[in-house]
Image (cartoon, rainbow, N blue to C red):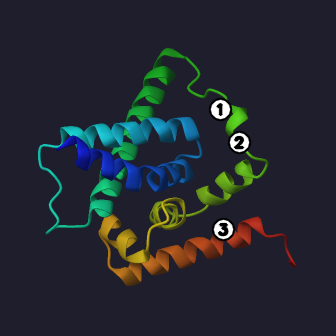
Amino acid sequence: MRPEHFERLFAEHAEPLLGYLTYRTGNRALAEDLLADTFERVLRARRPFDPRKASEKTWLYTIALNCLTDHVRRQAAESRALARVGQPDHVEPDRADSFHDREDLLAALMTLSEEEREAVALRYGGDLPVKEVARITGTNRTTAEARIYRGLKRLRAWLEPEGA
């Protein structure tokens, strides 16, 4: 990949991609690490971007989703290993990066199915149109819209006080 192409790709997509990853992980520092991993994979890609298969944005978000999946798997393996040796696997997150409703939002997000959580994160965290959400998740537009709708409905029910 030519440096000028990589720089343009980064300039156009890094900020919204960081938003998606932050929304998805709830941890800005981790999201920044995953963003760096994503663009490292872009640079090392054996198969470069193919405009006949998808848009650049879909390609990048798919790579980011794979980085996130790899991180979750690694974290689960580390937790299992620590549990076997009797070490605690939970470290208190850095509170300097949080806002007062973060815990409520994260609790609400955990009530969603994995598919709903992913669709909502791509749509609102990544600021992607539904068409792109459908491509990245490998579903049709109607399914993506339904997941987003159901996810938002559950989030509202969880976060809004009764009678509001």
- Residue, disc 2: 98
Residue at 50 percent of width and 65 percent of height: 127
Residue 65: where, in percent of width, then height?
36, 52
Tell me: 55 left or right of 13: left
- Mark 3 / mark 1, whichever is N-terminal: 1
Residue 63: where, in percent of width, then height?
30, 50
Residue at 65 percent of width and 32 percent of height: 93
How far apart in space, not on screen, are marks 2 and 3 (Cα)? 19 Å
Q: Which mark is residue 93?
A: 1
Residue 7: where, in percent of width, then height?
31, 45
Looking at the figure, which quarter contains the N terminus? Answer: top left
- Residue, disc 3: 155
CB within 8 Å, label 3 to label 1: no
CB within 8 Å, label 2 to label 3: no
Q: Which amino acid does label 2 sit on?
A: Ser
Q: Residue 153 carries which label?
A: none
Q: What residue type is labelled 3?
A: Leu
Residue at 61 percent of width and 61 percent of height: 111
Q: What residue type is labelled 1?
A: Pro
How far apart in space, not on screen, are marks 3 and 1 (Cα)? 23 Å
* Of labels 2 and 3, the one closer to you: 2
